[in-house]
Image: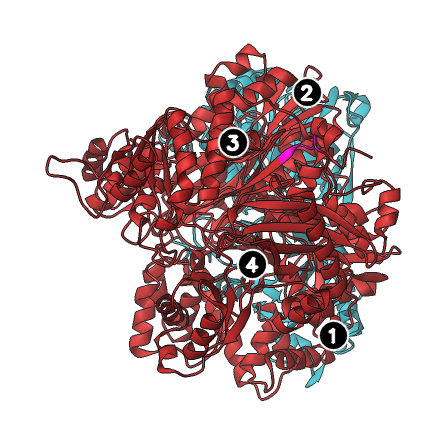
Chain colours: A cyan, B red
Amino acid sequence: MTSKVIDAPTFEGAALLVLEDGRTFSGRAYGARGTTLGEVVFNTGMTGYQETLTDPSYYQQIVVMTAPHIGNTGVNDEDPESLRMWVSGFVVRDPARKPSNWRAERSLDDELVAQGIVGISDIDTRALTRHLRERGTMRAGIFSGDALSANGYPRRVGELVEQVKAAPSMKGANLAHLVSTPHAYVIEPCGKFAGHEPLKTVVAVDLGIKSMTPQRLAERGIRVHVVPASATIDDVVALNPDGVFFSNGPGDPQASTHEVALLREVLDRGIPYFGICFGNQILGRALGFGTYKLRYGHRGINQPVKDMMTGKVEITSQNHGFAVDAPIGQESVAPHDGGRYGKVVVSHVGLNDNVVEGLECRDIPAFSVQYHPEAAAGPHDAAYLFDRFLTLMASGAPSAAGLSRAERVATKEN
Amino acid sequence: MPRRTDISSVLVIGSGPIVIGQACEFDYSGTQACRVLRDEGLRVILVNSNPATIMTDPEFADATYIEPITTDVLTSIIAKERPDALLPTLGGQTALNAAIALDEAGVLEQYGVELIGANIEAIQRGEDREQFKKVVEVCGGESARSAIVHSLDEAKQAAVDLGYPVVVRPSFTMGGLGSGIAYTPADLERIAGAGLHYSPTTEVLLEESILGWKEYELELMRDKNDNVAVICSIENVDPVGVHTGDSVTVAPALTLTDREYQRLRDISIAVIREVGVDTGGCNIQFAVDPETGRVIVIEMNPRVSRSSALASKATGYPIAKIAAKVAIGYTLDEITNDITGTTSAAFEPTIDYVVVKVPRFAFEKFPAADDTLTTTMKSVGEAMALGRNFTEALGKALRSLDKAGASFHWDGVPASGDELDQLLTEIKRPTDRRLVQVQQALRGGASIEQVFDATKIDPWFLDQIQLMNEVAQRVAQAPALTRELLLEAKRNGLSDQHIATLQDIKGSRIAAETAVREVRRALGVRPVFKTVDTCAAEFDAKTPYHYSTYEQETEVAPREREAILILGSGPNRIGQGIEFDYSCVHAALALKDTYETVMVNCNPETVSTDYDTADRLYFEPLTFEDVLEVYEAELAAGPVKGVIVQLGGQTPLSLADRLDEAGIPILGTTPAAIDAAEDRAQFGRVLTEAGLPAPAYGTATTLGEAKTIAERIGYPVLVRPSYVLGGRGMEIVYSPEQLSDYVQRALGEAALSGGPLAPILIDRFLDDAMEIDVDVLFDGTDMYVGGIMEHIEEAGIHSGDSACVLPPVSLSDAEIERIVRSTRALAQGIGVHGLMNVQYALASDVLYVLEANPRASRTVPFVAKATGVPLAKAAALVMAGQTIAQLRENGVLPATGDGAMLGIDAPIAVKEAVLPFKRFRTEAGLAVDTVLGPEMRSTGEVMGFDVDFPTAFAKSQAAAFGGLPTTGRMFVSVADRDKRQIVFPIKRMAELGFEILATSGTAKVLRRAGITASEVRKHSQGPGENGEPTVVDLITRGDIDIVFNSPSGQGARADGYEIRAAVTAADKPIITTVQQLSAAVQAIEAVIAGPFTVTSIQEHAASTIGGVR
């Protein structure tokens, strides 16, 4: 019905979501007015919009929230995962008129305006989600305010579609350096370790890091040096780390030549490595596996992942559009350079669609997961992975093999 | 890792009769469990005393025992069946308590029965307040400051320490029975006193008050691999202080950030682990301080609960089914998510709609009861609705209640001035009217802050209600309805009727609604149907579980097969409960092979709203507007044969006329025929033509007319307002004074001024008549008699409250013959095509027709169970066009004979009603009156099933309330009219060893008859000079074991009230009719004669008509 629209709507407060395949959704302007372009993706979390909006992995993406009521708890200054909102656009069904929460400091609507995030509300987000599920994520644009008309006439939808199609595609995009911190900074041990000598020192390469990640390390007594994506192996080694961490981040891992090269340097030096999300894809590529784009990705906080070592299922927070292509079920030799990094196993698998959700090296001290143990937003089931990293660094073990069982016993006793 | 192989048979305990706090959600969960276990090849042994359940249908278990859920009976069943395991977590608190009792009695150990789903230690840790507090602490959570007390003195001291108000919660009771909030020491004495009594461990917890805090509930599932998933979060709109069963609740939680929500989740998971619910579900309730966010864990249920049923329907995740699977050893990742068919059950559902549940109350049935909502649950049912936002879901939920005054309205002028102040004061006290009062206060201009201060309802919800008011105002002010305005109104939950009223469209209500619908449709504003898919559309859904909303895209799949819509019965209420859902479910099962069955219902507790029951499920309000839209959506999807309205009780039946006028084919009895039975004049003609007598009657519109008619008919007369059905406001009146009193009370003082009244129906009341219920199936030619039931109470007690027996034990063959003949004449005269229930009164050898209802009755499941014939299935097939002859041929009905001609060795089934009196208190804190009358007040029923009447009756009493005493003291106080008839039964009681106590008048009669009876002081006499107690004192102290009190001159309700209230409070059996008394005496004799023998319905089947094929 809406895909037959020829002219953009121009009533007061109108907004139009235009997909690259020509489908449109007419709604109301939400947040800032104007034009925004990006890859449109859906997130199924029922809580955590503030964390989502400030997650750098959503850079250049227009995020559709499948939960209908967004903004109910307003905005506070404690929950953002970075210093700003990164999404390129925001799509919701029912924005809150009145935020209500003891921590709320202002409304989400105001915050979106303040941060210049163009949004659209009052559209059939379920229809849109189903469309993306069937057709795959695609480029889209949100147009509102002046962007809907030109020279006093409504703009033609066809013209808007062309504008959307002209936007860069996510495939092949190298974006991490655009969201990374410009300068290195340090997070000292906190919580019960506050003021203590760090148990370990980790260099965290910021490919779009969320603030909860160094926090989770710091509260385990770790000093975290967060360094820019552009860091070299010399920068890393100079900090004399006990371990190296690669964060989540936006873009296509295939385009991340620098990061892959950096990680290989780390692995070659036998420095324990832990990666999350993008950091998992980089490990996969460093080991010689391919990566591919999922049809519509995993974005939500209810994603079940099975730990292949223990058979246990954890409910995880996820946000990824790409995945590692590695053999599930048996140990294999990492293909890179004739097996230089030895054997590797897929340690975690997504239960919904059998996607690789974690890698564990058997001969070198490296492991990674595709999902988000730091949660924020999301369940804390996978927080044990930070303990696993600490154990790996502390044990001086030559590989990450078998860590899962030992660490499970250890965390149970805590 | 497949299921455990060391278990081959499982005993499942059901939840017994429907009572407040434990309703048909446990039939839903138990039915799911039985299905799962049988599919796994396990032998299922089921015990449940409630015949109106689907789970007790013979095909759901290998051995089904419709027997009392008592330790003795369960022990006999275990000894006989020798199950390997007992699954106690799906039958509510009843099953859990039964399992604990079996364990304590050593029965489980003796017979080597393993508890699965939860172990005794886990149950104790979860339910025992003190142990649970420790669990919470270990888990890093916080409990309300509290004290455990075992006596009133301890309670008083503790309350001083904690500071008033304090919350009182007895241990091990269900539905919050016996709990409340004490503001003063006097409150404390009353509430804690009762609580100590109801707690099986005489233990009560007192807590600091967290009144007004935000309340949340999380539903969890855990398997043996320690995988835990949160299935659903539920937020209560009514803050802490109102029982969650009485609260308006919403899913998912809407006013928490992720950090706050994850904190609840973390605590929940730690708690389920610490408590040790290894394989199954549980729910955990939280309070959150709206000012600071401080979190307090309120309680947990280590079992599937009412909220689990709600959570299952809200998310599409079948908690009970999964709980049964994990109990027998599966892990969550081994179980497939039914809805998607591809993903696993090890995940947490995420939803892209809002679910609102609203409770339905029955205070009108208990006018003396205090209607303040507290931590003791008082609602009798609930409706649920789904929408794409809160306002849409709330509007739909309120209209699903099918109750006048329950929906928001914009009638009259908004409240202002004193009236507004009054509203703001009234909403401080939570009642079933509060939400509408809140809406009216906001409409009248009260600020959200003011309403929040008065109610502590979260401002976000208040703002949403305000939004509905704003939209309503825009509709009211609009010169004409536009597409945008209509869309906005519909998206915010306004019905066509609302819009018609707001637009002030002239004409009848129906005409105005029709006008709106036509405009709406002309403007293309039609609902679409979305799918409940557990995953917010992330994966394709295979299960057509739909709800309506105003959006762009519909998800109803086209189909080839012809569809039949079955309209359910909506929220449970007194008079329309699970029995109707039973018939609807049977229709779905019977028609599934030939048709695409489409269920429409809005009750989350039921089996009918299980997506497994019908081929398609529409979770929608049962209003004309909503049903019509479902019908048209299905018509667009493929051919529709028609709609079944006669199985779901009065709610769908009342839509028949309008659906018919809209051109929708009504299957079975036509709307015209339904009218013929419901309209007094038309029905009179049917009776005359059939040559059947009915009690004399008349319709009065003034007091004078009423008196004249009553004189003509002769007192006593049965009076009722003409506009209600099902006994509402019905009374038996013995004199002109009582008649004036009735008119005055029922219709207000104004009536006495001589002006016209709403019509009152006046019927002759047949004193000393025997009441008979008949359920038949008629196909236009042949009649199949399902069963004939003889009431144990005389006519005048609502048939739903009366115990009855099948086959009738005192009717002669000639009388039965007469009943069958008359019933056939009625079926033909009315034009029944399907089921019909007729109520007769047999007095002085005249068979009077009291009423005939051309629909499924409350007794259909009882009849089906008692005779072993699937009557409801047969009815559905007849409505779809099969004949009784065909059904006899293909084995659905017996080849020959019917329920009127049961063999001499047919088992005897007694149905007993279960009444909710102990739930209700007057404002003064006394129990409400327990006298039965023409207005139905029971919430549920049980069945006693055995080879003879005394044993069957004894079983029914054991099942209904734990059983009659076999020794002890009996107190007798009767109306003069009953004095002659009590001599024999009381004499027998004395012979059986009971000590008889009586008030002076009754004692005199008894002594003259040679019965030793000690005299006790009446309540009105007060204690004697030497402190001799009154009968009320004795009862309160627990010194009386059974009471017979027949109220004199039924109108004078105060008489004997204190006695009955005290007995109710003391939780002892009370008998209020002579007929009941003689049945009780026989039953006591049967109990004394020896323990019950247990027989499964599959074993009984050999001697029932259904078994004789």
Same chain for labels 2 and 3? Say yes or no.
Answer: yes
Chain under numbered label 2: B
Of the two numbered discs 3 and 1 on the same chain, state the one appearing first in sequence: 1
**Would residue B891 appear left or right of B567 to someone viewing this image?**
right
Residues drawn in magenta: B904-908
Which of label 3 and label 1 is nearer to you?
A: 3
The tag on residue B9 is 2
Three-letter code for the amino acid on which mark 4 is drawn: His
- Report x, y in % for residue A295: 78, 47
Q: Amino acid at mark 1?
A: Glu
Q: Residues within 10 Å of mark 1 (few under 14, many from 20)?
A: few
- SS class of the residue under badge 3? helix
List x then y, in percent, for residue B532.
68, 51
Give the residue drawn at x 49%, y 18%: B103
Question: Tag 2, which secondary structure?
Answer: strand
Q: Earlier in the sequence, mark 1 or mark 2?
A: 2
Q: Nearer the viewer, mark 4 or mark 1?
A: 1
Q: Are marks 3 and 1 on the same chain?
A: yes
Q: Position of residue B118 (x, y in %)?
A: 54, 25
Pick the front one: B805 or B343 = B805
Amino acid type, mark 3: Ala
User: How far is disc 4 from disc 1 in space, using C-alphas?
Assistant: 39 Å
Q: Are marks 3 and 1 in contact (CB under 8 Å)?
A: no
- The residue that label 4 is drawn on is A69
Alpha-carbon distance for marks 3 and 4? 55 Å
Circle 3 residue? B954
Q: Secondary structure at mark 1?
A: helix
**Mark 2 and mark 3: span between their CA atoms?**
29 Å
Q: Chain of mark 3?
A: B
